Image (cartoon, rainbow, N blue to C red):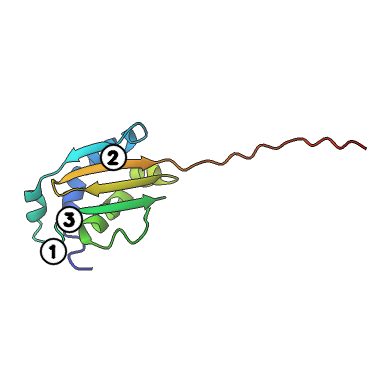
């Protein structure tokens, strides 16, 4: 993957804020305004810009959403942090960055299926 690692320092800078916002996703979507010039300063050439959508389940990317360097580096930084990596276990998180460089964090709850045991009375 071209430019892999180019965004690592940028994501590490934002990690404390992202970590706090991730915890708040249980109640509602969270947003963080990023700055395009910071992405441009990395020197990485990205035809697609910095727009991406990253879906994370149990700390791993799903549906090959981490194919571009900017999202791959974010996932790497999140998993390097022990607190964040532990928090991601058992959760489904969607992280998107729009053209306006606004990062949105969304948590999808896994539907828990409860099977209730029923007592069956046999009448003979």
Tell me if residue 64 comes above or below residue 97 in the rendering.
below
Mark 1 or mark 3, which is nearer the start of the sequence? 3
Q: Which one is nearer the viewer's eye here, 102 or 121?
A: 121
Q: Quadrant of residue 90?
A: top left
Q: Which residue is mark 2?
A: 19
Mark in front: 2 vs 1: 1
Q: On the image, numbered disc 1 is attached to which residue?
A: 47
Residue matched to label 3: 7
Residue 1, horizontal then vertical, whole percent: 23, 68
- Locate residue 3, reporting x and y percent: 17, 65
How many residues crowd mark 1 within 10 Å: few (<14), some (14–19), many (20+)? few
Q: Would you say 105 lies left or right of 36 here? A: right
- Quarter occupied by residue 22: top left
Looking at marks 2 and 1 on the same chain, the residue that comes earlier in the sequence is marked by 2
Provide the secondary structure element on which disc 3 rests.
loop
Q: 117 and 45: which one is in front? A: 117
At 28% from the left and 47% from the top, the residue drawn is: 95
Specify which label sits upstream in the sequence, 3 or 2. 3
Element assignment for label 2: helix
Residue visible at 22% across and 38% down in the picture: 31
The residues bearing labels 3 and 2 have C-alpha atoms spaced at a distance of 17 Å
Quarter of the rendering occupied by the C terminus: top right
């Amino acid at each position: 993957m071209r430019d892999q690692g180019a965004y690592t320092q940028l994501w590490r800078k934002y990690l404390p804020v992202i970590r706090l916002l991730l915890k708040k996703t249980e109640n509602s979507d969270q947003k963080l305004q990023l700055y395009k010039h910071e992405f441009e300063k990395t020197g990485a050439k990205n035809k697609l810009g910095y727009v991406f959508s990253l879906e994370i389940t149990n700390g791993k990317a799903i549906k090959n959403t981490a194919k571009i360097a900017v999202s791959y580096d974010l996932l790497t930084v999140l998993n390097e942090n022990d607190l964040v990596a532990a928090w991601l276990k058992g959760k489904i998180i969607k992280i998107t960055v729009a053209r306006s460089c606004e990062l949105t964090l969304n948590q999808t709850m896994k539907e828990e299926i409860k099977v209730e045991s029923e007592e069956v009375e046999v009448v003979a």
